[in-house]
Image: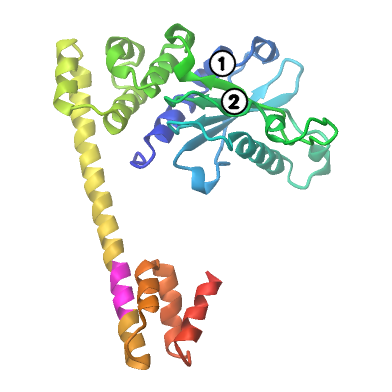
Amino acid sequence: MADLHNPHDTLFRALLSDPGRARDFLRDHLPNTIVGQLAPAPPEILEGGFVDEALAGSQSDLLLKVALKAGTNAFVYVLAEHKSAPDPALPLQLASYMIRIWKRHAGTRAARLRALPPIIPVVVYHGAATWTVADSLRDMIATDDPDLAFLPGAGYILRNLRAMEIDALSRNPALRAVFITLRQEALAFLAEIADSLPAGSDLRRQVLEYVLRVYNVDLDDLRATLRTGGHSEMEALVGTIAETLLEQGKAEGEARGLAKGKAEGKAETLRRQLDRRFGPLPRDIEARIADAGPERIDAWLDAVLDAPDLAAIFAQDSLH
């Protein structure tokens, strides 16, 4: 099931999880000096997941292992920045992700620690705002003395999709179609997208789902446009996707409602028990209970029976 809360991540992974498309992406978007060193075999798709949890809604990542003509391997770390405006902290975040990759690769094996593979960092950005982020950590460090600027990563390769000409996006039709979609220009290129993504393909469905979830588009207008353009299969698929998303949204809403009701029930139980033991609750305690999540309320409930006073119970707050 698609992640309703992060359509950018869903489409990004659907695009580059195919080794052939990933190879074409590298061919189109890495400098020629690097492309010339790559062996012809497609990259190996490795597990990503290096993005900080707090940024998971605005960044996606994918780790590729590529063979070099020299007989060794390298990693290509693709970080997609989904914010509408660039994050000035990105070079710092990227450096930390690269270190995590090396640490996971090497572990405690001395031989690997002495011969870390190169990591080629690529940042893909499709936001509307101009890219104003520093090109590297060196540009963020407040010194002109190179002897003081110790860096975990020298820089990154930026592919600003919004700033590129359409023809430069990719020679691979599927890559080009998805990049156009991420630029939020899919409605102007529906015929090209229909020709580029075969009927019945997962990627065609992902693109249409992205349009429905992210674009400010009227469902009836979209279906009418597809019908007029002779794209009856896409029109029917849009209707199916819309129904599925509606059902998913209802299910998530019901789940959130159940979770909220359960939390409110726990909070009410806590209030009753506290009131019976210690009398009417002060306003600050009421406010803390109202703002607390289920786990914190559980901790307070566990403390109610044995605590000598309210202060002892809410000292549990410091443990979370």
Work out which quarter of the rendered image holds the N terminus and state it.
Answer: top left
Question: Is the image coloured rainbow, by chain, by secondary structure, or in one colour?
Answer: rainbow
Q: Going 20% across and 14% down the picture, which residue do you hit?
A: 231
Looking at the image, residue 7 lies above or below residue 103: above
Q: How far apart are the two marked residues, 1 and 2, measured between alpha carbons? A: 9 Å
Query: Which residue has dot 2 on it?
Result: 122
The residue under the point 36% across, 82% down is 282
Q: x, y percentage for residue 152?
A: 74, 36
Type of secondary structure dominating the magenta stretch: helix
Residue under pointer 1: 29
Does the magenta run of residues contain 18?
A: no
- The kind of secondary structure element at disc 2 is strand
Amino acid beneath label 2: Val
Q: Residue at x 43, y 90 (%)?
A: 305
Residue type, label 1: His
Which is nearer the N-term, disc 1 or disc 2? 1
Q: How many marks?
A: 2
> Which stretch did the figure color magenta?
262-269
**Residue 142 % position (x, y):** 73, 36
Neighbor class of circle 1 (other Cα within 10 Å; few <14, some 14-19, many 20+) is some
Q: Nearer the viewer, residue 188 or 241?
A: 188
Dot 1 and dot 2 residues touching (CB under 8 Å): yes
